[in-house]
Amino acid sequence: MSEMRYINRDNYEAWFLDYLEGSLTDSEQRQLSSFLLNNPDLKQDLHKEDLVRLPSDYMQSFDAKQKLRRAPSPFSELSEYEFAMADALENGNPFPMERAKMSAADQKEWTLYKSTILRAHAVKYPRKKALKRRSFAILPDAFRVAAAAILLMLLYNTKDSTELVEGRHKGHYEPSTQISSSLTASIPEQTKELADNVTNNEQTKAVLLEAPIIMDATFSINEKDSEIEEYRAYIEPIGEQQIRQQLAELGQPEIPNVYETGLKLMMPHYINNHNSLAALYELPETEALASASEKSNTITSELLKRINPLNISYDRIYDEAGELVAVNLSADGFELSQRIPKWLNRRE
Amino acid sequence: MTEKAYNQCVELHADNLYRFIFNNIKDSDMASDIVQDAYEKMWLYKDGVDPAKAKSYLFTTAYHLLVDTVNKNKHLIPIEQQPEQEFSTDRGYSDLNEILHDVLNRLPADQKMVLMLRDYEGYSYQEIGEITGLSESQVKVYIYRARVFLKKYIGRLEVVL
Protein backbone atom coordinates (compact mmCIF):
# COMPACT_ATOMS: atom_id res chain seq x y z
CA MET A 1 0.00 0.00 0.00
CA SER A 2 2.10 2.80 -1.27
CA GLU A 3 -0.51 5.57 -0.90
CA MET A 4 -2.36 6.54 2.22
CA ARG A 5 -5.94 5.31 2.07
CA TYR A 6 -8.95 5.76 4.29
CA ILE A 7 -11.63 3.33 5.29
CA ASN A 8 -15.32 4.15 4.83
CA ARG A 9 -18.57 2.26 4.37
CA ASP A 10 -17.93 1.88 0.66
CA ASN A 11 -14.58 0.14 0.86
CA TYR A 12 -14.66 -1.49 4.28
CA GLU A 13 -14.88 -5.07 2.79
CA ALA A 14 -11.50 -4.69 1.12
CA TRP A 15 -10.09 -3.48 4.44
CA PHE A 16 -11.62 -6.46 6.22
CA LEU A 17 -10.02 -8.86 3.72
CA ASP A 18 -6.69 -7.22 4.07
CA TYR A 19 -7.01 -7.42 7.80
CA LEU A 20 -7.78 -11.15 7.68
CA GLU A 21 -4.87 -11.72 5.36
CA GLY A 22 -2.64 -9.70 7.69
CA SER A 23 -1.60 -7.26 5.07
CA LEU A 24 -2.62 -4.08 6.94
CA THR A 25 0.01 -1.83 8.36
CA ASP A 26 -0.07 -0.70 12.00
CA SER A 27 -1.58 2.69 11.18
CA GLU A 28 -4.19 0.96 8.95
CA GLN A 29 -5.06 -1.44 11.76
CA ARG A 30 -5.55 1.53 14.11
CA GLN A 31 -7.72 3.22 11.47
CA LEU A 32 -9.78 -0.01 11.12
CA SER A 33 -10.30 -0.22 14.93
CA SER A 34 -11.49 3.39 15.02
CA PHE A 35 -13.85 2.69 12.08
CA LEU A 36 -15.38 -0.35 13.85
CA LEU A 37 -15.96 1.71 16.99
CA ASN A 38 -17.89 4.24 14.96
CA ASN A 39 -19.74 1.52 12.94
CA PRO A 40 -20.50 -1.35 15.33
CA ASP A 41 -23.05 -2.87 12.90
CA LEU A 42 -20.22 -3.88 10.61
CA LYS A 43 -18.12 -5.46 13.30
CA GLN A 44 -19.86 -8.82 12.97
CA ASP A 45 -19.08 -8.98 9.27
CA LEU A 46 -15.41 -8.96 10.01
CA HIS A 47 -15.66 -12.38 11.60
CA LYS A 48 -17.78 -14.11 8.94
CA GLU A 49 -15.62 -16.91 7.45
CA ASP A 50 -17.47 -17.06 4.15
CA LEU A 51 -16.21 -13.62 3.33
CA VAL A 52 -12.66 -14.75 3.15
CA ARG A 53 -12.82 -18.48 2.49
CA LEU A 54 -13.63 -19.81 -0.94
CA PRO A 55 -15.31 -23.12 -1.48
CA SER A 56 -12.90 -26.04 -1.46
CA ASP A 57 -13.38 -26.64 -5.25
CA TYR A 58 -11.87 -23.28 -6.04
CA MET A 59 -8.88 -23.95 -3.92
CA GLN A 60 -7.66 -26.79 -6.10
CA SER A 61 -4.87 -26.05 -8.55
CA PHE A 62 -5.79 -25.57 -12.22
CA ASP A 63 -4.94 -28.91 -13.75
CA ALA A 64 -4.99 -27.59 -17.32
CA LYS A 65 -2.10 -25.24 -16.66
CA GLN A 66 0.17 -27.49 -18.64
CA LYS A 67 -2.07 -26.99 -21.62
CA LEU A 68 -1.70 -23.22 -21.34
CA ARG A 69 2.04 -23.05 -20.86
CA ARG A 70 4.14 -22.99 -23.98
CA ALA A 71 6.78 -25.61 -24.66
CA PRO A 72 10.44 -24.57 -24.62
CA SER A 73 11.95 -23.15 -27.77
CA PRO A 74 12.01 -24.23 -30.59
CA PHE A 75 8.75 -26.02 -29.81
CA SER A 76 7.01 -22.91 -28.52
CA GLU A 77 4.27 -23.36 -31.10
CA LEU A 78 3.11 -26.31 -29.02
CA SER A 79 1.76 -26.25 -25.51
CA GLU A 80 3.76 -27.89 -22.77
CA TYR A 81 1.16 -30.60 -22.66
CA GLU A 82 1.35 -31.34 -26.39
CA PHE A 83 5.10 -31.31 -26.23
CA ALA A 84 5.11 -33.76 -23.32
CA MET A 85 2.82 -36.13 -25.21
CA ALA A 86 4.77 -35.95 -28.47
CA ASP A 87 8.07 -36.20 -26.67
CA ALA A 88 6.99 -39.27 -24.75
CA LEU A 89 5.83 -40.86 -27.97
CA GLU A 90 9.01 -40.05 -29.83
CA ASN A 91 11.26 -41.27 -27.06
CA GLY A 92 9.27 -44.43 -26.59
CA ASN A 93 8.13 -43.59 -23.07
CA PRO A 94 5.12 -45.55 -21.89
CA PHE A 95 3.39 -42.46 -20.46
CA PRO A 96 4.03 -38.74 -20.64
CA MET A 97 3.31 -38.27 -16.89
CA GLU A 98 2.71 -40.30 -13.79
CA ARG A 99 -0.15 -42.61 -14.48
CA ALA A 100 -1.79 -41.76 -11.18
CA LYS A 101 -2.03 -38.14 -12.25
CA MET A 102 -3.47 -38.94 -15.67
CA SER A 103 -7.16 -38.21 -15.92
CA ALA A 104 -9.49 -40.06 -18.25
CA ALA A 105 -9.16 -37.22 -20.72
CA ASP A 106 -5.38 -37.50 -20.58
CA GLN A 107 -5.59 -41.22 -21.14
CA LYS A 108 -7.70 -40.65 -24.24
CA GLU A 109 -5.32 -38.00 -25.51
CA TRP A 110 -2.40 -40.32 -25.00
CA THR A 111 -4.17 -43.07 -26.93
CA LEU A 112 -4.75 -40.65 -29.78
CA TYR A 113 -1.11 -39.62 -29.81
CA LYS A 114 -0.04 -43.23 -29.95
CA SER A 115 -2.30 -43.68 -32.96
CA THR A 116 -0.38 -41.09 -34.94
CA ILE A 117 2.47 -43.50 -35.62
CA LEU A 118 2.20 -44.42 -39.27
CA ARG A 119 2.15 -48.03 -40.24
CA ALA A 120 3.64 -48.63 -43.64
CA HIS A 121 1.61 -50.31 -46.32
CA ALA A 122 3.32 -53.09 -48.19
CA VAL A 123 4.07 -51.52 -51.56
CA LYS A 124 5.82 -53.22 -54.45
CA TYR A 125 7.81 -51.17 -56.87
CA PRO A 126 6.56 -52.35 -60.27
CA ARG A 127 9.74 -51.73 -62.25
CA LYS A 128 12.22 -53.31 -59.93
CA LYS A 129 13.56 -55.70 -62.54
CA ALA A 130 14.35 -52.85 -64.88
CA LEU A 131 16.58 -51.27 -62.26
CA LYS A 132 18.88 -54.23 -61.98
CA ARG A 133 22.12 -54.27 -63.87
CA ARG A 134 23.39 -57.28 -65.71
CA SER A 135 26.82 -57.79 -67.18
CA PHE A 136 28.10 -60.53 -69.42
CA ALA A 137 30.02 -63.28 -67.73
CA ILE A 138 33.70 -62.55 -68.10
CA LEU A 139 35.78 -65.49 -69.29
CA PRO A 140 38.70 -66.56 -67.17
CA ASP A 141 42.18 -65.53 -68.33
CA ALA A 142 42.91 -68.96 -69.74
CA PHE A 143 39.87 -68.73 -71.98
CA ARG A 144 40.87 -65.25 -73.08
CA VAL A 145 44.33 -66.43 -74.07
CA ALA A 146 42.89 -69.40 -75.92
CA ALA A 147 40.39 -67.21 -77.73
CA ALA A 148 43.13 -64.78 -78.74
CA ALA A 149 45.29 -67.63 -80.00
CA ILE A 150 42.46 -69.07 -82.07
CA LEU A 151 41.71 -65.66 -83.48
CA LEU A 152 45.34 -65.16 -84.45
CA MET A 153 45.52 -68.55 -86.07
CA LEU A 154 42.40 -67.86 -88.07
CA LEU A 155 43.76 -64.52 -89.20
CA TYR A 156 47.09 -66.05 -90.19
CA ASN A 157 45.51 -68.91 -92.11
CA THR A 158 43.06 -66.75 -93.97
CA LYS A 159 45.66 -64.22 -95.02
CA ASP A 160 45.12 -63.41 -98.62
CA SER A 161 47.98 -64.87 -100.59
CA THR A 162 47.25 -62.66 -103.54
CA GLU A 163 48.54 -59.17 -103.45
CA LEU A 164 48.90 -56.45 -105.95
CA VAL A 165 52.38 -55.54 -107.00
CA GLU A 166 53.46 -53.05 -109.51
CA GLY A 167 53.70 -54.70 -112.86
CA ARG A 168 55.79 -54.09 -115.90
CA HIS A 169 53.41 -51.52 -117.25
CA LYS A 170 53.57 -48.18 -115.61
CA GLY A 171 50.41 -47.35 -113.70
CA HIS A 172 48.99 -50.81 -114.14
CA TYR A 173 48.62 -53.44 -111.46
CA GLU A 174 48.27 -57.14 -111.90
CA PRO A 175 47.84 -59.98 -109.51
CA SER A 176 50.83 -62.04 -108.67
CA THR A 177 50.86 -65.34 -106.86
CA GLN A 178 53.30 -65.73 -104.02
CA ILE A 179 55.06 -69.04 -104.37
CA SER A 180 56.09 -70.60 -101.15
CA SER A 181 59.80 -71.34 -100.87
CA SER A 182 59.14 -74.91 -99.78
CA LEU A 183 57.32 -75.57 -103.00
CA THR A 184 59.75 -73.80 -105.32
CA ALA A 185 62.66 -75.60 -103.78
CA SER A 186 61.25 -78.89 -104.93
CA ILE A 187 60.75 -77.81 -108.54
CA PRO A 188 63.40 -79.37 -110.80
CA GLU A 189 65.57 -76.97 -112.80
CA GLN A 190 64.55 -78.60 -116.06
CA THR A 191 60.91 -77.92 -115.43
CA LYS A 192 61.74 -74.31 -114.66
CA GLU A 193 63.58 -73.90 -117.96
CA LEU A 194 60.67 -75.48 -119.75
CA ALA A 195 58.27 -73.07 -118.22
CA ASP A 196 60.59 -70.17 -119.08
CA ASN A 197 60.56 -71.21 -122.71
CA VAL A 198 56.79 -71.53 -122.85
CA THR A 199 55.88 -68.16 -121.40
CA ASN A 200 57.31 -64.98 -120.03
CA ASN A 201 54.30 -64.37 -117.83
CA GLU A 202 55.29 -64.98 -114.22
CA GLN A 203 51.83 -66.06 -113.19
CA THR A 204 51.52 -68.61 -115.94
CA LYS A 205 54.92 -69.96 -115.08
CA ALA A 206 53.92 -70.33 -111.49
CA VAL A 207 50.83 -72.23 -112.43
CA LEU A 208 52.73 -74.55 -114.70
CA LEU A 209 55.42 -75.22 -112.18
CA GLU A 210 53.28 -75.58 -109.14
CA ALA A 211 50.41 -77.59 -110.50
CA PRO A 212 51.94 -81.05 -110.18
CA ILE A 213 53.47 -80.27 -106.81
CA ILE A 214 50.30 -78.81 -105.39
CA MET A 215 48.25 -81.69 -106.72
CA ASP A 216 50.75 -84.11 -105.32
CA ALA A 217 50.62 -82.41 -101.96
CA THR A 218 46.85 -82.25 -102.04
CA PHE A 219 46.47 -85.87 -102.90
CA SER A 220 48.98 -86.93 -100.32
CA ILE A 221 47.10 -84.95 -97.71
CA ASN A 222 43.92 -86.62 -98.74
CA GLU A 223 45.68 -89.95 -98.78
CA LYS A 224 44.38 -90.76 -102.23
CA ASP A 225 47.39 -92.80 -103.21
CA SER A 226 45.65 -94.55 -106.06
CA GLU A 227 44.89 -91.27 -107.79
CA ILE A 228 48.48 -90.07 -107.35
CA GLU A 229 49.78 -93.24 -108.90
CA GLU A 230 47.37 -92.86 -111.78
CA TYR A 231 48.58 -89.29 -112.32
CA ARG A 232 52.21 -90.33 -112.25
CA ALA A 233 51.49 -93.17 -114.63
CA TYR A 234 50.12 -90.61 -117.05
CA ILE A 235 52.86 -88.01 -116.67
CA GLU A 236 56.04 -90.09 -116.53
CA PRO A 237 55.76 -91.93 -119.87
CA ILE A 238 55.20 -88.66 -121.70
CA GLY A 239 58.73 -87.45 -121.15
CA GLU A 240 60.31 -84.04 -121.29
CA GLN A 241 60.20 -83.59 -125.07
CA GLN A 242 56.55 -84.34 -125.30
CA ILE A 243 55.70 -81.91 -122.55
CA ARG A 244 57.71 -79.23 -124.34
CA GLN A 245 55.79 -79.91 -127.57
CA GLN A 246 52.43 -79.88 -125.88
CA LEU A 247 53.19 -76.64 -124.12
CA ALA A 248 54.37 -75.09 -127.37
CA GLU A 249 51.12 -76.10 -129.02
CA LEU A 250 49.18 -74.32 -126.32
CA GLY A 251 50.80 -71.07 -127.38
CA GLN A 252 51.04 -67.89 -125.33
CA PRO A 253 48.25 -67.95 -122.73
CA GLU A 254 46.35 -64.77 -122.27
CA ILE A 255 46.05 -63.75 -118.69
CA PRO A 256 43.55 -60.88 -118.33
CA ASN A 257 44.80 -57.77 -116.69
CA VAL A 258 42.66 -56.98 -113.67
CA TYR A 259 42.73 -53.23 -114.11
CA GLU A 260 41.84 -53.36 -117.75
CA THR A 261 39.11 -55.92 -117.16
CA GLY A 262 37.61 -53.79 -114.47
CA LEU A 263 37.78 -50.72 -116.59
CA LYS A 264 36.09 -52.49 -119.43
CA LEU A 265 33.26 -53.58 -117.17
CA MET A 266 32.75 -50.16 -115.65
CA MET A 267 33.10 -48.06 -118.77
CA PRO A 268 29.69 -48.83 -120.34
CA HIS A 269 27.94 -47.88 -117.11
CA TYR A 270 29.96 -44.74 -116.84
CA ILE A 271 29.20 -43.73 -120.41
CA ASN A 272 25.55 -44.58 -119.95
CA ASN A 273 25.26 -42.43 -116.83
CA HIS A 274 27.16 -39.64 -118.47
CA ASN A 275 24.81 -39.68 -121.46
CA SER A 276 21.78 -39.76 -119.22
CA LEU A 277 22.92 -36.74 -117.29
CA ALA A 278 23.76 -34.93 -120.49
CA ALA A 279 20.34 -35.80 -121.89
CA LEU A 280 18.61 -34.43 -118.85
CA TYR A 281 19.96 -30.98 -119.44
CA GLU A 282 18.96 -31.13 -123.05
CA LEU A 283 15.31 -31.94 -122.39
CA PRO A 284 12.93 -29.45 -124.04
CA GLU A 285 11.23 -27.05 -121.64
CA THR A 286 7.57 -27.86 -121.26
CA GLU A 287 4.96 -25.89 -119.46
CA ALA A 288 5.32 -28.04 -116.41
CA LEU A 289 9.03 -27.43 -116.43
CA ALA A 290 8.81 -23.81 -117.24
CA SER A 291 10.41 -22.45 -114.18
CA ALA A 292 14.00 -23.06 -113.39
CA SER A 293 13.16 -24.33 -109.95
CA GLU A 294 10.82 -26.96 -111.32
CA LYS A 295 13.43 -28.06 -113.79
CA SER A 296 15.92 -28.31 -111.01
CA ASN A 297 13.39 -30.29 -109.07
CA THR A 298 12.97 -32.81 -111.83
CA ILE A 299 16.68 -33.08 -112.36
CA THR A 300 17.20 -33.68 -108.69
CA SER A 301 14.58 -36.37 -108.71
CA GLU A 302 16.04 -38.00 -111.78
CA LEU A 303 19.52 -37.85 -110.37
CA LEU A 304 18.39 -39.45 -107.17
CA LYS A 305 16.71 -42.19 -109.10
CA ARG A 306 19.74 -42.89 -111.22
CA ILE A 307 22.50 -42.75 -108.68
CA ASN A 308 20.92 -44.44 -105.75
CA PRO A 309 19.94 -48.07 -105.42
CA LEU A 310 16.91 -47.32 -103.22
CA ASN A 311 15.09 -45.52 -106.02
CA ILE A 312 14.59 -42.42 -103.92
CA SER A 313 12.56 -39.71 -105.56
CA TYR A 314 12.17 -36.07 -104.61
CA ASP A 315 9.11 -34.01 -105.51
CA ARG A 316 7.75 -30.61 -104.70
CA ILE A 317 4.04 -30.19 -104.09
CA TYR A 318 2.25 -27.01 -105.13
CA ASP A 319 -1.24 -25.81 -104.30
CA GLU A 320 -3.77 -24.37 -106.73
CA ALA A 321 -2.25 -20.93 -106.45
CA GLY A 322 1.10 -22.34 -107.43
CA GLU A 323 2.57 -21.93 -103.98
CA LEU A 324 5.06 -24.53 -102.82
CA VAL A 325 3.39 -26.25 -99.88
CA ALA A 326 5.47 -29.35 -99.26
CA VAL A 327 8.34 -31.46 -100.39
CA ASN A 328 8.04 -35.19 -100.75
CA LEU A 329 10.83 -37.72 -100.48
CA SER A 330 9.86 -41.26 -101.38
CA ALA A 331 11.43 -44.59 -102.13
CA ASP A 332 10.33 -48.17 -102.52
CA GLY A 333 9.75 -48.71 -98.86
CA PHE A 334 8.83 -45.30 -97.49
CA GLU A 335 7.47 -41.86 -98.18
CA LEU A 336 8.35 -38.72 -96.27
CA SER A 337 6.54 -35.41 -96.62
CA GLN A 338 7.57 -32.10 -95.13
CA ARG A 339 5.13 -29.20 -95.14
CA ILE A 340 6.72 -25.85 -95.96
CA PRO A 341 5.78 -23.02 -93.57
CA LYS A 342 3.95 -20.18 -95.27
CA TRP A 343 6.48 -17.58 -94.17
CA LEU A 344 9.16 -19.55 -95.97
CA ASN A 345 7.12 -19.90 -99.11
CA ARG A 346 7.26 -16.41 -100.56
CA ARG A 347 7.84 -16.17 -104.20
CA GLU A 348 10.12 -13.46 -105.38
CA MET B 1 29.94 -50.47 -55.04
CA THR B 2 29.84 -53.66 -57.06
CA GLU B 3 27.10 -54.69 -59.42
CA LYS B 4 26.04 -57.33 -56.93
CA ALA B 5 25.77 -54.80 -54.11
CA TYR B 6 23.84 -52.48 -56.37
CA ASN B 7 21.35 -55.18 -57.32
CA GLN B 8 21.01 -56.06 -53.67
CA CYS B 9 20.13 -52.42 -53.02
CA VAL B 10 17.42 -52.68 -55.63
CA GLU B 11 15.98 -55.71 -53.88
CA LEU B 12 16.18 -54.18 -50.43
CA HIS B 13 15.22 -50.57 -50.90
CA ALA B 14 13.33 -50.06 -54.16
CA ASP B 15 9.94 -50.84 -52.62
CA ASN B 16 10.50 -48.59 -49.63
CA LEU B 17 11.80 -45.78 -51.75
CA TYR B 18 8.85 -46.06 -54.09
CA ARG B 19 6.41 -46.08 -51.18
CA PHE B 20 8.04 -42.99 -49.70
CA ILE B 21 7.87 -41.10 -52.97
CA PHE B 22 4.43 -42.35 -53.95
CA ASN B 23 2.89 -41.44 -50.61
CA ASN B 24 4.23 -37.96 -51.05
CA ILE B 25 3.12 -37.18 -54.56
CA LYS B 26 0.36 -39.75 -55.17
CA ASP B 27 1.43 -40.24 -58.75
CA SER B 28 2.73 -43.68 -59.62
CA ASP B 29 4.44 -42.62 -62.85
CA MET B 30 6.23 -39.71 -61.29
CA ALA B 31 7.17 -41.80 -58.27
CA SER B 32 8.48 -44.48 -60.56
CA ASP B 33 10.55 -41.98 -62.50
CA ILE B 34 12.04 -40.55 -59.33
CA VAL B 35 13.00 -44.01 -58.07
CA GLN B 36 14.55 -44.79 -61.42
CA ASP B 37 16.48 -41.52 -61.46
CA ALA B 38 17.75 -42.11 -57.93
CA TYR B 39 19.05 -45.56 -58.82
CA GLU B 40 20.45 -44.27 -62.09
CA LYS B 41 22.43 -41.67 -60.20
CA MET B 42 23.67 -44.21 -57.70
CA TRP B 43 24.86 -46.45 -60.53
CA LEU B 44 26.57 -43.51 -62.18
CA TYR B 45 28.50 -42.71 -59.02
CA LYS B 46 28.71 -46.26 -57.75
CA ASP B 47 32.44 -46.07 -57.19
CA GLY B 48 31.98 -43.36 -54.61
CA VAL B 49 29.00 -44.91 -52.82
CA ASP B 50 29.61 -46.91 -49.68
CA PRO B 51 27.26 -49.94 -49.80
CA ALA B 52 26.59 -49.47 -46.08
CA LYS B 53 25.23 -46.00 -46.78
CA ALA B 54 23.48 -46.85 -50.01
CA LYS B 55 20.00 -46.55 -48.51
CA SER B 56 20.73 -43.13 -47.15
CA TYR B 57 22.23 -42.11 -50.50
CA LEU B 58 19.13 -43.30 -52.34
CA PHE B 59 16.73 -41.54 -50.01
CA THR B 60 18.75 -38.34 -50.10
CA THR B 61 18.79 -38.33 -53.88
CA ALA B 62 15.13 -39.23 -54.10
CA TYR B 63 14.22 -36.63 -51.51
CA HIS B 64 15.82 -33.84 -53.51
CA LEU B 65 14.20 -35.05 -56.71
CA LEU B 66 10.92 -35.17 -54.83
CA VAL B 67 11.30 -31.63 -53.54
CA ASP B 68 11.98 -30.44 -57.08
CA THR B 69 8.89 -32.26 -58.29
CA VAL B 70 6.74 -30.88 -55.49
CA ASN B 71 7.98 -27.38 -56.20
CA LYS B 72 7.09 -27.82 -59.83
CA ASN B 73 3.62 -29.03 -58.93
CA LYS B 74 2.59 -26.79 -56.09
CA HIS B 75 -0.60 -28.61 -55.28
CA LEU B 76 0.04 -28.89 -51.57
CA ILE B 77 -1.40 -26.07 -49.49
CA PRO B 78 0.35 -25.38 -46.18
CA ILE B 79 -1.72 -26.49 -43.24
CA GLU B 80 -1.85 -22.96 -41.86
CA GLN B 81 -3.62 -21.82 -45.00
CA GLN B 82 -6.20 -24.55 -45.05
CA PRO B 83 -9.71 -23.52 -44.01
CA GLU B 84 -11.09 -24.93 -40.79
CA GLN B 85 -13.78 -26.96 -42.52
CA GLU B 86 -11.06 -28.88 -44.29
CA PHE B 87 -10.39 -30.60 -41.01
CA SER B 88 -13.78 -32.28 -41.00
CA THR B 89 -14.92 -34.94 -43.36
CA ASP B 90 -17.97 -37.01 -44.05
CA ARG B 91 -15.96 -39.78 -45.55
CA GLY B 92 -16.42 -43.15 -43.92
CA TYR B 93 -13.21 -44.80 -42.85
CA SER B 94 -12.75 -48.43 -42.09
CA ASP B 95 -9.33 -48.20 -40.60
CA LEU B 96 -7.43 -45.66 -38.51
CA ASN B 97 -4.35 -46.13 -40.65
CA GLU B 98 -6.42 -45.17 -43.66
CA ILE B 99 -7.48 -41.98 -41.89
CA LEU B 100 -3.91 -41.19 -40.99
CA HIS B 101 -2.73 -41.56 -44.54
CA ASP B 102 -5.52 -39.32 -45.67
CA VAL B 103 -4.60 -36.73 -43.06
CA LEU B 104 -0.97 -37.06 -44.01
CA ASN B 105 -1.74 -35.41 -47.33
CA ARG B 106 -2.98 -32.36 -45.48
CA LEU B 107 0.37 -31.83 -43.83
CA PRO B 108 2.91 -29.45 -45.32
CA ALA B 109 5.31 -31.32 -47.60
CA ASP B 110 8.33 -30.98 -45.34
CA GLN B 111 6.49 -32.26 -42.25
CA LYS B 112 5.00 -35.09 -44.22
CA MET B 113 8.35 -36.19 -45.61
CA VAL B 114 10.20 -36.20 -42.32
CA LEU B 115 7.37 -38.00 -40.57
CA MET B 116 7.34 -40.71 -43.20
CA LEU B 117 11.09 -41.11 -43.02
CA ARG B 118 10.72 -41.43 -39.28
CA ASP B 119 7.83 -43.87 -39.15
CA TYR B 120 8.27 -45.85 -42.35
CA GLU B 121 12.01 -46.13 -42.43
CA GLY B 122 12.82 -45.70 -38.76
CA TYR B 123 15.48 -43.08 -39.38
CA SER B 124 16.89 -41.09 -36.47
CA TYR B 125 16.60 -37.30 -36.36
CA GLN B 126 20.22 -37.06 -37.40
CA GLU B 127 19.77 -39.35 -40.40
CA ILE B 128 16.65 -37.50 -41.49
CA GLY B 129 18.61 -34.29 -41.15
CA GLU B 130 21.32 -35.68 -43.42
CA ILE B 131 18.77 -36.77 -45.99
CA THR B 132 16.74 -33.59 -46.01
CA GLY B 133 19.46 -31.09 -45.30
CA LEU B 134 17.57 -29.83 -42.27
CA SER B 135 19.02 -29.40 -38.81
CA GLU B 136 18.31 -32.12 -36.29
CA SER B 137 16.34 -29.65 -34.20
CA GLN B 138 14.25 -28.60 -37.19
CA VAL B 139 13.50 -32.23 -38.00
CA LYS B 140 12.33 -32.75 -34.45
CA VAL B 141 10.11 -29.68 -34.57
CA TYR B 142 8.51 -30.84 -37.82
CA ILE B 143 7.85 -34.29 -36.43
CA TYR B 144 6.36 -32.98 -33.19
CA ARG B 145 4.16 -30.54 -35.06
CA ALA B 146 3.02 -33.26 -37.42
CA ARG B 147 2.15 -35.57 -34.53
CA VAL B 148 0.14 -32.89 -32.78
CA PHE B 149 -1.70 -32.09 -35.99
CA LEU B 150 -2.49 -35.72 -36.70
CA LYS B 151 -3.71 -36.21 -33.15
CA LYS B 152 -5.95 -33.17 -33.38
CA TYR B 153 -7.35 -34.33 -36.69
CA ILE B 154 -8.20 -37.83 -35.61
CA GLY B 155 -9.52 -36.41 -32.33
CA ARG B 156 -11.90 -34.17 -34.24
CA LEU B 157 -13.11 -37.05 -36.29
CA GLU B 158 -14.08 -38.67 -33.00
CA VAL B 159 -12.72 -41.95 -34.11
CA VAL B 160 -13.76 -44.83 -31.95
CA LEU B 161 -10.59 -46.35 -30.71
Image: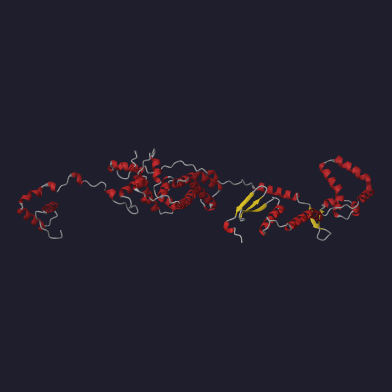
Q: Is A15 left, or right, of B39 in this rendering?
A: left
Snapshot quadrant of residue A98: top left
A18 left or right of A104 in image: left
View extreme (right): residue = A241
Residue A219 percent coordinates (x, y): 84, 43
Q: Toward the viewer: A203 or A24?
A: A203
Query: Can residue A88 be seen?
Result: no
B94 displayed left or right of A333: left
Q: Tell me residue B93's x, y (percent).
A: 38, 39
In the image, residue A318 sits, relative to residue B23, either above or below, namely below
> Residue at the spot x=65%, y=48% of the render?
A334
Q: Of A322 and A170, which appears nearest the observer?
A: A322
Coordinates of residue B135 in the picture (x, y in percent): 41, 54
Looking at the picture, how far across and down is residue A147, in whole percent? 68, 47
Q: Nearer the viewer, residue A148 or A296?
A: A296
Which residue sits at x=48%, y=44%? B15
At horizontal 84% and vertical 47% (from top left) the residue drawn is: A214
Q: Give the quadrant of residue B158.
A: top left
Q: Quadrant of the C terminus of chain B?
A: top left
Identify whether A127 is placed above or below A181. above
Color scheme of the displayed model: secondary structure
From this viewpoint, is residue A43 visible? yes
How many numbered callouts? Answer: 0
